[in-house]
Amino acid sequence: MRIPRGDLLRSRVVDDPGTTLSTALDRRLTGYAVFEPQDAVLLDDETRGVLTFEAGIPTLAYCTDTDRGGADALNDLAGPGPYSVDLYELDRTDLAEAHGADDLRVPPGLPAERLTADRDLVTRTREAAPDERLGDDADAVATFLEDEAGIEAIREQARAEARARAEEWGLTDALDD
């Protein structure tokens, strides 16, 4: 995916990617965000994800590390914070070619659903989305629920992170394997 460099609006480390998604929605931003999850921030990992927006509505997702797009890219980025996030504004015409890539498209509410636990943000995003984009959401949810390997990968990642935190806090005796 080739996107010209936009005008940097903000660069932050956030605990919840929902902060960035909400900012894009409230500003009705046309542009993109570059997300670097915890592993990239703390362990010098190369994982980065790009999420584009049109009038504040998420449109495309792409993970540079795995070279996957769409819902798969969101799965690659999902995890606990912190995230380093750069938010860019870009003219709609500069995104037109990228937004034509159907294999990278995401339903409007899916990024908020996968990257944050903020149900209100999911609802606000879906309500703000154009009607022609809303049909994508039902298909994405069905696809996600059918992806047993993806769901198990998310569960395993959560278990590993819980084990690591329990060990860090000296609570390994309290774990129930």
Image (cartoon, grey):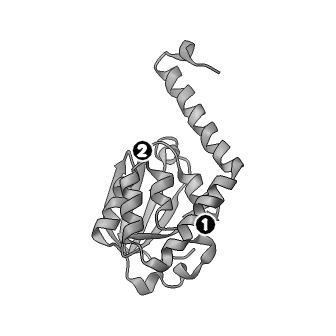
Residue that badge 2 annotates: 82
**What residue sits 44% from the left and 50% below the top?**
116
Mark 1 or mark 2, whichever is nearer to me: 1
In this rendering, position of residue 55 left or right of residue 156: left
Query: Is 167 placed left or right of 8 in the picture?
Result: right
Amino acid under label 1? Asp
Q: Which residue is mark 1?
A: 139
**Please, which residue is most extreme toward the right here?**
149
| Amino acid at circle 2 | Pro
Q: Residue at x 42, y 44 (%)?
A: 82
SS for callout 2? loop
Label 1 sits on a secondary structure element that is helix
- Judge whether residue 64 can be spotted in this image: no
Q: Quadrant of the N terminus?
A: bottom right
Figure quadrant of the C terminus? top right
Number of numbered tags placed on the structure image: 2
What residue is rendered at 36% in x and 76% in y? Answer: 55
Q: Quadrant of residue 88?
A: bottom left
> Which residue shows up at 42% across the image and 58% down it?
122
